[in-house]
Amino acid sequence: MYKTKETSTNQLNKAIAIDKCPVTYTLEKIGGRWKALVIYNLLSGPKRYGELKKALPAITEKMLIQSLKEMELDKLVIRDVKPVVPPHVTYHLTEAGKALGPALKAMAEWGLSYSENGQGEGKCDMPPAVF
Amino acid sequence: MYKTKETSTNQLNKAIAIDKCPVTYTLEKIGGRWKALVIYNLLSGPKRYGELKKALPAITEKMLIQSLKEMELDKLVIRDVKPVVPPHVTYHLTEAGKALGPALKAMAEWGLSYSENGQGEGKCDMPPAVF
DNA sequence: TTTTGTACTTACTTTTTGGTTAGTACTTGT
DNA sequence: ACAAGTACTAACCAAAAAGTAAGTACAAAA
């Protein structure tokens, strides 16, 4: 009934879109549940792993590490290790990472203008109203 | 469009992030494989369903309709039906949809600056180099 | 000796997204 | 009678993303 194709159309479409469309390329780097939040937290300066975790209470360790690793491979963040025990690791944005600021700001502005329910300040793990 | 389980941690995290973070809110509206592409095509003016399909050769009818429907519910696009046969349906952006222009532009600019491989023009179904 | 702290890693399951295939309605043209 | 054109709809399935639970290493402090 259903033939299992050797190549996934999904992957193919994704690759083409990323290659051809700069917006999709960018979306690929900052999309997902957590990356924008992590970048936001790093925009104010380098942070230790534990600080990021505390800043994002809802994230699991797996997702935090995974996001950081992918962003490291994508050259958006740099991981600095001090060879001590217990470990001391900090993360900071590359130039490319910092350069995402304007795009994130533009998205935040649209979100603020066009979402009806207010953007609470509060103790949330999310960026504040004004990015 | 697709069914979601309301009680999943996934859904909960998503809902919180969307509610609290304007960037995540925006990402929710234009994320996924096709929405940015559809919006791009509508930025130049209203288009018929068939025109959109032709402009995006790789999209399936299911995904095109699904994207349009979700964006209609999100009040980014408006669907106009002329009650004729065969059907004549056009889609155009709302003010909110048009207002995404700057955010998409900022993302496109980042993508162009920080992706190494060139943005071919060609007969692709993707936005051209300069958004 | 056991606990504490830090920054992870692994194996596994659930949930969501995207794709495939087939079909619908209605009218005009052949 | 039947194919063509238009804009969909529905059932199903595979693959990707996100979450759960548990464990690792190492040294210092209790």
Image (cartoon, coloured by chain):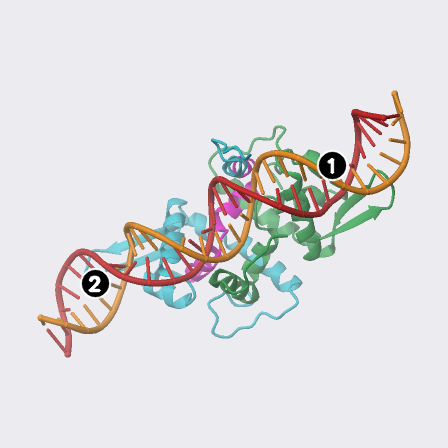
Chain colours: A cyan, B green, C orange, D red
Q: Position of residue D26 (x, y in %)?
A: 14, 59
* Placement of the C terminus of chain B among the 4 image quadrants: top right
Indicate the amino acid at tag 1.
Answer: Glu
Give the CA distance from mark 1 to mark 2. 60 Å
In this rendering, the answer to whether D15 lies above or below A48 is above
User: What residue do we see at 61% from left, 71% from top?
Assistant: A118
Q: Which chain does the numbered disc 1 sit on?
A: B
Q: Position of residue D10 (x, y in %)?
A: 67, 47
* Residue A34 falls within the magenta-colored stretch: yes
Q: Which residues are magenta?
A: A16-44
User: What residue do we see at 37% from left, 64% from top?
Assistant: A53
Q: Position of residue C18 (x, y in %)?
A: 56, 43
Q: Classify residue B15 by image quadrant.
A: bottom right
Secondary structure beneath dot 1 equals: helix
Between tags 1 and 2, which lies in front?
Answer: 1
Q: Evaluate whether label 1 is on the same chain as label 2.
A: no
Using the image as rendered, state which of residue B124 and residue B34 is in the foreground.
B34
- The answer to whether any part of residue B102 appears in the image is yes
Q: Classify residue A22 by image quadrant.
A: top right
In this rendering, the answer to whether B95 lies above or below D5 is below
The majority secondary structure of the magenta stretch comes to helix
Using the image as rendered, state which of residue B80 and residue B111 is in the foreground.
B80
Secondary structure beneath dot 2 equals: loop
Where is mark 1, residue-wise?
B51
Q: Is residue A75 left or right of residue A8?
A: left
Using the image as rendered, state which of residue A41 and residue D26 is in the foreground.
D26
Q: Is residue B96 left or right of residue A103?
A: right
Q: Position of residue B112 (x, y in %)?
A: 53, 40
Kindly identify which numbered label has been placed on residue A86: 2
